[in-house]
Amino acid sequence: MDEDVSPSSKKGVVHELGVPLDDISIDELELRIEALKAEIKRLEASIEDKKSSKSAAESVFKF
């Protein structure tokens, strides 16, 4: 197994940014892309939640 691919029962494939891609199969690359897309969606959702919380807090403290 490659050092840069760590299967996890909950999260699947882990991709480390900047690793050489020469020895990674097309299937593995596709799995990594899907995992990264899912992580981007999760991060974007977190940003939206934080923006909503910040907006709500700012509206409470406006005088």
Image (cartoon, rainbow, N blue to C red):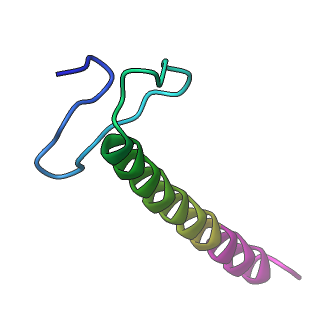
Answer above or below: position of 7 versus 31.
above
Image coordinates of residue 11 in percent, x first then y, are 24, 50
- Horizontal side of 47 relative to 15 (left or right) equals right
Quick one: quadrant of the N terminus? top left
Q: Nearer the viewer, residue 45 or 51?
A: 45
Residue 51: which quarter of the image?
Answer: bottom right
Image point 56% across, 22% down: which residue? 18
Q: Residue at x 40, y 51 (%)?
A: 30
Taking depth in this image into account, of 12 and 45 the one nearest to the observer is 12
- Residue 22, quarter of the rendered image: top left
Of 8 and 27, nearer the camera is 27
- The image shows residue 29 at horizontal and vertical percentages of 41, 42
Q: Is residue 3 above or below residue 61?
A: above
Q: Magenta segment range?
A: 51-63
Asked if the magenta segment contains residue 25, the reply would be no
Which of the 4 image quarters holds residue 58? bottom right
Residue drawn at (63%, 72%), measured in percent from left and top? 48
In the rendered picture of this protein, how many numbered marks are placed on residues? 0
Q: Is residue 49 above or below residue 3?
A: below
User: Where's residue 32, x and y in %?
Assistant: 40, 45
Q: Quadrant of the C terminus?
A: bottom right
Residue sitting at the far right: 63
- Up-down relation of residue 7 to residue 59 (above or below): above
Residue 40 horizontal/vertical position (percent): 54, 57
- In the image, taking residue 15 as reference, residue 28 lies left or right, namely left
Q: Main secondary structure of the magenta part?
A: helix
